Every structure is written in structure tokens, then in C-alpha cells.
Amino acid sequence: MDSRGSLAFDEYGRPFIIIRDQEGKSRLSGIEAHKSHIMAAKTVAGVLRTSLGPKGLDKLMVSPDGDITITNDGATILKQMDVEHQIAKLMVQLSQSQDDEIGDGTTGVVVLAGALMEHAEKLLDRGIHPIRITDGYEMAAKVAVEHLDTIAENYVINRKDTDTLTQLAMTTLGSKIINRCHRHMAQIAVDAIMAVADFDRRDVDFELIKVEGKVGGKLEDTMLVKGVIVDKDFSHPQMPKSVKDAKMAILTCPFEPPKPKTKHNLEVKSVEDYKKLREYELKKFEEMVQQVKDAGANLVICQWGFDDEANHLLLQKELPAVRWVGGPEIELIAIATGGRIVPRFEELTTEKLGKAGIVKELSFGTTKDRMLVIEECQNSRAVTIFIRGGNKMIVEEAKRSIHDALCVIRNIVKDTRIVYGGGAPEISCSLAVAKAADKISTLEQYAMRAFSEALESIPLALAENSGLSPIHTLADVKSRQTKENNPRLGIDCLNKGTNDMKEQNVLETLSSKRAQIMLAVQLTKMILKIDDIRAPSDQMM
């Protein structure tokens, strides 16, 4: 054999060739590998850095199909970016895990991880071993999280006065496209969570909140519906456009004559046979409609379709119907109306009907688009947020923004502790970590000081994005925090004339800040432990 492979035999004596593909692989090891990782992390963090804060800029991404997305949500930006570097992919997953766990702070966590990697590079250049750096980072993270617990304030949720909760949601929505009506949006998010929250279990079931969007109208037309909105209309144009005191039969069986489950052929050899078949179908349709009427239903919600004959019969019998309603929507309608999903007509009884005060059809402008609104439901805990916007991009970004606000309010229901935003907790933690580093006599003190400096990357980015002088602003706030011992002082991004975030009502949940620090440190620790990469040449960057 030549140098590209060697001949070998298995236990039965059959020959096979072992191919050497070492030439087609590239390898990076030692300090080169670390530098490559740090460069990738810094690049990804640099992309998101300008999107941080209320004055952060948006990114426009075009998919291969030509679809345009405009957003400044960190998780969405990274998800849509075409990332090939292995370490950069880890940064994308970091943002995603923050989004899954907390729902907010996806940009901040990536910026912090990028700063930690950048400061680790300086320590590596000074000859400090990666393991000692990660140990120092772990110690610093522990100090920072403990310090966050001491500066956090407990917030008591008052269901009648939700003004502070609205301020919390407004902090989240401040950096989004929809910030021109962010008080209205924040109030909708708070009202939605208050409607479905279980305060005894401290839990919020997101399945009960449906977010529906429709292009057209203004963002200000967005509303909260105490019920369900379905993107369907009544099956026949002559059916009534609204049904009061609706008793709904929620069916997952079609209005069709029964058919054998197995493959079959039906031969119609004469006109009499055809007439019998037609009579049989008509009789079955009438039986089905009568079974629904006998149960006391005055509206049918069907998961499947039905043909024109069944549709005409339903109109004749004055039984409005909606067809092709999707599975998740059927379940939400059943939860909202207190009805049961019925798989067979024979099982339909009065007790299984869903009840609603009114079911009406909405029409939009000059378009023929229509939607159904089911309101005054028996179970008022199911709600729908109906978003309007000038174009598809605005509606989609509004959906993402509302999701972030909902997640933040859910977090405060689960854990009622809050910290003040504007980079104030990061500056306070930075001072606490720097103070703790002075008490450490081992090599880890350098890593702890690096961690302290990395935490300052968040307020620096906030100041820079707000058009302020980053270093002067940060130095001023740091010195004031030290002199006044006030952990609420942050960056005045909106030029309101005060650095006290309590006066500005800039609030964030403690759980979000803790998750940011812990997730960023875990990822940095994992990346710094990698010192050797083997990959195909075309994938090595």
C-alpha cells in the first residue's frame, strides 16, 4: 500500500483498508488555540455590544430566502447569524440558554463572556496557567453573586397596584423597536401575567398566554383579549357573524360518513347504488348535526374540514361552525371555555360543551382577512395578546419584545427580589470583587481583578451606546458609589439628570443578573480548558 493507507484483516481474514486522512486535518494547540478561541469570542461579543441598552442599535439580517429580520434581541441576532467557528457557536448557545432560562439579558451575557475572555488573554500573555485563571473567575463569581444577594431588594407584588411591575417590564422593553409605546406594551404584559399567574405555587403557565399578530394598524392598537383569538372565520359566509352565550362542541372528528380504516374499494354499478350511497351520506350528515343539536350546542369548532354538503346542512340547521382549527388552538379553546375535546359524535354530551359569553368575527380594513374572538370565557385565566403593526417585521419584533417582558414578569413572580439596572449592579459587584481580591494571597487574585474589570464592560457599553464618554462616566459613577456607598448608582443612559436608578425606575430581576454572571463564567471556564483543536482544514479558522 502507498502512504495514504494500510491493509489490515478482520477476525475472519477479510481484508480492509485503513485510510490515513491526517494530511487533510489541521491542528491548533497551546497558546495558539487559546488565542483563536478568544478572538472568536471577542468577535461575537463585539457584534452584540452596540445593541446593549436603551440606546442600543438594531441589526438587520437577510436570510438565504431573502426574508428580512430587524432586531436587537441578542438571542435572535446570534440564531440568525451564519456562524462557523466552533467557539463562536458556543457563544450562540450561551445566548440561547439565557433566553430559555430567563428570557431576558441575552445581549448582556454575551458581552460579559466576551470581556472575560478578553481579560483572560492578558493573563495568559503574562504566563498564568488557564486553570488558575478559571479558578480565580469561579471565586470572583461566587463573591459577585453573594454581593448581588446583599444589594437586592424584596418586591411585594400588589395585584391591585401593578405600577412597579409595569416599570420592570418597561426597563426590558426600553431597548426594543416598540419603545415609543412601551408603557402600553408593558401594561399588557403585566395584565396577561396577572391573569394567568398561580401565586400559591409561584408559577406562570405560558401555555395559557397566546401571542397572535396581524399586519395592519398601529402598534398602539395592540390589545389584551381575555379569551382566545383564532385566525379562522365561520365556514359559510351566510352564518351569523357573532354568537352570544355560545355553547361550543369542540370536535376532533370530521363531518364525514364513516370509512373503513383499511384500504378499500367501493364499486357503484348502477344509478340505484349511487342514489343509495348519496342517501346514506345525507342520513349520516343529518345524524351528526342532530347529535350536536341534541347536546345543546349552538356553535361547532372542528379540527378537520367538511365538504360543501355538510356546510350547507349546518347553515340550514342554524348551527354556525368553524373548520380547520389547529391542535394547539383547539386545546386552548377547551381550557378557556371549560369544554372537553370530543373525538366521536356519540360521546358528545351537554357536560362536555365549552361556554363563552360571545364569539364574534373581526374584519380588518379593506382586506378580506377575518379572525374569530372568543370572549367572556368560563375560565378567565386564558388570555391572548393581539399585536398590530405596520409591517411583518414590526409585528415579529413586537412578539419577541412582548415575550421578553412576559418572561421578566414571570421571573419576579417566581423570585420577588429585584436589583436596579443601568449597570449599577455590575459596578457594585466589580468594587466588591476588587476588594475581595486584595485579601487573596495566591495567584488567583490577578484573575479576580480581571473579572472585576470585565464586569465594567456592561456599564462601559451602556455609556458608549448612549453617546457619553465611557471612561469618564464610569469613573464618575464608581467614585460616587464608593463615597456614598450607594449600589443604586448607574449610567444615566436617557439623560434624565440623575444616576440613581431607583429614581429613574430602572429595575431588573435578581435572577436575570445571577444567571448572566454564572452562565458567562461557566462558558469562559469551559473554553479556557481547551488547548488543542483538531478539525478538517476547511473548517479550521
Image: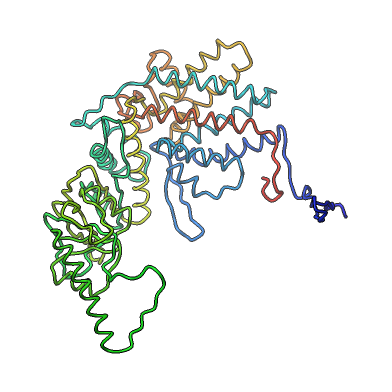
Q: From the top left corner, tell me how far across and down residue 16 is, in percent.
A: 80, 55
Q: Identify which residue, 102 or 106, lies in the foreground.
A: 102
Dividing the picture into quarters, in which one does residue 243 lie?
bottom left
- Please tell me whether residue 61 is drawn above or below residue 380 in the rendered image: below
Q: Identify which residue, 406 or 286, lies in the foreground.
A: 286
Classify residue 355 as left or right of residue 483.
left
Which residue corresponds to the image point at 50% horizontal and 31% vertical from the top-left? Answer: 519
Q: Identify which residue, 411 or 163, lies in the foreground.
A: 411
Which residue corresponds to the image point at 44% horizontal and 32% vertical from the top-left? Answer: 462
Q: From the top left corner, tell me how far across and down residue 246 is, in percent.
A: 14, 56
Quadrant of image for the N terminus: bottom right
- For this orientation, the residue located farthest to the right is 1
Classify residue 496 as left or right of residue 512.
left
Which residue corresponds to the image point at 50% horizontal and 36% vertical from the top-left? Answer: 110
Q: From the top left corner, tell me how far across and down residue 210 is, in percent.
A: 30, 48
Q: Identify which residue, 81 or 382, lies in the foreground.
A: 382
Quadrant of image for the C terminus: top right
